[in-house]
């Protein structure tokens, strides 16, 4: 009671019961900030009528202050509400405002993105071991390679295409590795992963 910002951080299937149970205790001037995947602004407004609502999609790197969160504002949400949410979420990473028609795609991209990156890391570790390297050495090399590559990208004025080209000499070892990844459909697999996660986010948002 009396809170200016009420954060809803429960599983999507539990949002309705939680908000219905707490509705009478939430001030009409409070802003509801939901981080439940797939739950739309309209869903939230129907559960807490007359309140400003902000829908957010964070990701797990927020645990180390490197998160990426997208937010959607309801019609009733003021600039003050948005700034309050951005201040809270900004403690754990960047915050981007988007329109609601984009939020499910954001969920599939940056929301689920860390899992895709971890899967690639798993695959690199497995590949190193299969090629005769000891696990502990492989894990150190892979972790530093991934972390260093991201830091290089963020510090550089060049994009990933240019940076990749710099280490891909024609006919060289990296070019051969890239060719194998392209032949096995890496790009298509990643696109499909983002699309499938987006569609699942839409499904999860269908409140009964």
Image: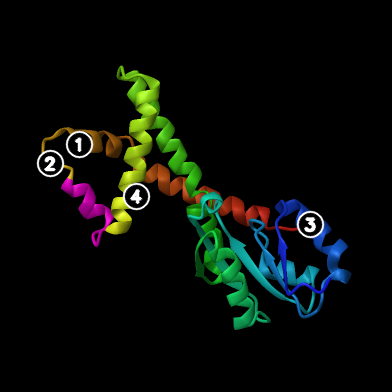
Instruction: Select label 1 or label 4 by which is in front.
Output: 4
2 or 4: tag closer to the N-terminus: 4
Q: Is residue 160 magenta?
A: yes
User: Which span of residues is magenta-colored?
Assistant: 156-166
Q: Which residue is mark 2?
A: 169
- Spatial CA span between label 1 and label 4: 18 Å
Q: Residue furthest top?
A: 132
Circles 1 and 3: CB atoms closer than 8 Å:
no
The residue beneath circle 1 is 174
Residue 57 x/y as whole percent: 58, 60
Residue at (32% x, 45% y) in the render: 148
Q: Residue at x 18, y 48 (%)?
A: 165
Which residue corresponds to the image point at 33% horizontal and 24% vertical from the top-left? 128
x, y percentage for residue 62? Answer: 54, 54
The number of discs equals: 4
- Residue placed most toward the observer, 187 or 5: 5
- Residue sitting at 26 percent across and 33 percent down? 180
Chain-order first, disc 1 or disc 3: 1
| Distance between mark 1 and mark 2 Cα atoms | 7 Å
Residue 83 on image: x %, y %:
58, 76
In three-dimensional space, the C-alpha distance between marks 2 and 4, rounded to whole angstroms, equals 21 Å
Helix, strand or loop for the magenta stretch, by majority: helix
Check disc 3 and report its element: helix, strand or loop. loop
Q: Which label sits on residue 150? A: 4
Contact flag, marks 1 and 4 (Cβ < 8 Å):
no
């Amino acid at each position: 009671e009396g809170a200016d910002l009420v954060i809803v951080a429960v599983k999507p299937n539990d949002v309705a019961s939680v908000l219905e149970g707490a509705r009478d205790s939430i001030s009409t001037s409070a802003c509801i900030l939901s981080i439940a995947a797939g739950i739309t602004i309209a869903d939230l407004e129907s559960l807490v009528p007359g309140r400003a609502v902000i829908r957010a999609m964070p990701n797990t790197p927020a645990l180390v202050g490197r998160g990426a969160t997208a937010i959607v504002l309801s019609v009733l949400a003021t600039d003050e509400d948005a700034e309050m949410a951005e201040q809270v979420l900004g403690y754990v990473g960047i915050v981007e405002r988007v329109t609601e028609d984009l939020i499910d795609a954001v969920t599939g991209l940056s929301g689920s993105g860390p899992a895709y990156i971890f899967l690639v890391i798993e695959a690199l570790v497995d590949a190193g071991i299969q090629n005769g390297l000891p696990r502990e050495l492989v894990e150190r090399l892979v972790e530093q390679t991934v972390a260093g590559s991201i830091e290089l990208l963020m510090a550089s004025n060049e994009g990933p295409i240019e940076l990749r080209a710099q280490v891909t000499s024609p006919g060289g070892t990296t070019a051969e590795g890239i060719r194998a990844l392209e032949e096995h459909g890496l790009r298509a697999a990643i696109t499909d992963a983002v699309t499938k996660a987006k569609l699942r986010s839409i499904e999860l948002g269908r409140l009964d």
